[in-house]
Amino acid sequence: MEAASHPPRPVGRAGLHDLSRIALESPYAEALADLEPTLLGRPAWVARKRVELRELFALAQLAPNRMSILGLDASTEIRALLDLRCDLSCLNPGDPDIHVERKARLFVRYPEAILRGPLPGTELVQIVEPHHVHHPNVGTAEAFGSAGPGAFASQTLCLGARIPRGLPLREALLMSYAALTLQSVQLDERDAAGVMNVDAARFWQQNPHRIPLSRETFLGEAS
Amino acid sequence: MEQLAIDVGAVLSAPRLYEIAASVEAIDATRGLEPSQRLPEVHGAPHALGQAFAGLVLVLVGQGSVGMLLTLWAAQVGVRAVVAVDRALVKPTSLLTHPVGPDEIGAPKARVAGRRAKALHPRTRVYAFEGDFEELPVHVLANASCILLASDNLLCEVAVAQRALHLGVPVLQGSVHGGTLSAQVRSVYGGEDGSGPSLCCGFGPAEWAHLDAGSVFSCAGDGAGRARPAGAPTMSPPYLCSMAASATLLELTRRVTGLVPFESSAMVGYSGYGSAIHTARLERRDSCPIDHQRFARAAPDPRLAERTPRELLRAADAAGADLRRVTFRVEAQRFASHLACGCDLHPDLGRFLPRGTGKGSRGLAPCGRCGQPLAPHPLHVHEEVPAILLAPHLDDTLAALGVRPPTSVCLRTDARTTLFASPFPEEP
């Protein structure tokens, strides 16, 4: 019965479903061990952080050419600076057309509040670089510099009308990848979720043939 | 004559917490009136009603058809202070259930309730908070005697439950269910050690599912980061709403007069459908996902911003604690330890910055090495600040580090969390 409902996975390369089972290798195993004594908070939150961090490292190990972790602090909430290799559209001031950048530097936070209820879609991910990202669900630094965890004028990536309670960190990263490559995008400014950059929404409404920027999966060629 | 509004929201990015001043007309009209002229002696109650009310600071969350009545009645019975909390505006449909007039359509509900309450009893300190409960400054809540909740937003309910438990503030929630002509009040108090029930202890799978699905956070600009219910409005006649408000204040009366202790967490329901009253004890559920920790509380400190982190560590019995195991959280502030620029080595900053304003990088000269603009580095901006980052600043006052009063500081060690807060209301 059990075998029928959960057929064994084909032997081969590990996939996203295997994150929790992947044995961490160096340097990720050491990095996780180094973080362990720094984890603060109530036991349930520390345990949750442990799981999320392990999966974050497993994801980086599984897709080393897609994602790299530049900085990580998990003493209170989880806060990570990441490079995500993905296509994303930018529009420099005065340029007639968008251009495609190949890498985004993201600041990702994972607060304890996610265990208690849904969060705004803007709460987790900010794009530190490149500047002038032209995306319906990315706030411009000028308009939305006040959002997010830092007082810096960053670009906030909206992951939807709500981030579900308890959404795993890895899911937030996969959603970010899908959003930036326009594999998943919300273009309708009349939608209840709204858009963060109306100009970009109109641009992409007029250029649907250029969507998505890439069809590569997270574990595709770059990984 | 237009009533004056005095801004006291120094800690907020927008001046949304303000005290409402009495009009000359209201002062004249109420001269010689005392709430006690109409307050009865409650049989067998240890405490006199008027005296008990006179010491209360009430935070009233939700200024709808139930909550607005609570605010008005709280002022009429002469409580010391009320804080009317709501971010919404009076709508035309509000005329059907709220105690408002046509000329108040479009005005913030918190302001309308506050002005009406102040006119009824000018000696009550009346504040309006035009915002989400989640944004209400901690020092206001920390000084509250009780929270009266009349919101139909589950996200708000969870936030009230969590903050009330942490701060040890009792909650009375009035609610209605129109289809069954029912009014209900739930009284919960986590107690001195957080072992009592929270509002969320009674949540079942249906409530959590509704919580997950029932709110929308629009990214369309003005409401970024704010939840709004996606469902239909509460359908209920005004007299049922007033029944819920009455039951809520009666339960408060029972508790402040000492007829029952605040620890007596209970639900009282009136069913107009079956003409019946039912009651139930409310108990803590071990699997409640809310943090049932009660913070230790220091006495309200009007000079809190002049304290140093080291003084607060000492006051929290954490002077010898390992700073890597201690954190500070300052109300509405983030601590930026480093700046970002084009250099690999980011310059130190070491200041608290107001949360959500974009302030902090303004006025900074470009980096002397790379010439790039300076801004707080995202990885080095903390809401909850590991104390080790404050090590170079342990003897600087909070004010010198950028904190402005009124404020509050949450100091967390492995053993306990201690809250330091400015007093509220402040001396007039």
Image (cartoon, rainbow, N blue to C red):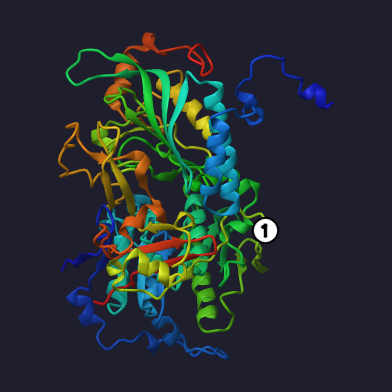
Q: Nearer the viewer, residue B144 or A107?
A: A107
Residue at the image point whose x is 37% and y is 10% from the top: A210
The N terminus of chain A, quarter of image: top right
Q: Nearer the viewer, residue A5 or A34?
A: A34
On screen, A180 above or below B249?
above
Numbered marks: total: 1
Q: Nearer the viewer, residue B201 or A123?
A: A123
> What is the crowding at mark 1: few (fewer than 14 residues within 10 Å), some, or many (at least 20)?
few
Outermost residue on the top side: it is A209
**At which x and y percent is residue A70?**
42, 31
Q: Secondary structure at mark 1?
A: loop
**At which x and y percent is residue B115?**
28, 67
On screen, B304 above or below A170?
below
The residue to which callout 1 is attached is: B286
On screen, A37 above or below B171?
above
Quadrant in the rendering for residue A16: top right
Q: Can residue B86 be seen here?
A: no
Residue at the image point whose x is 36% and y is 35% from the top: B219
Residue at the image point whose x is 40% and y is 81% from the top: B55
**At which x and y percent is residue B42?**
52, 88
Q: Is residue B278 left or right of residue B27?
A: right
Quadrant in the rendering for residue B262: bottom right
Q: Can residue A73 be seen here?
A: yes
Instruction: Identify which amino acid the numbered label 1 is placed on.
Output: Asp
Residue at the image point whose x is 26% and y is 82% from the top: B30
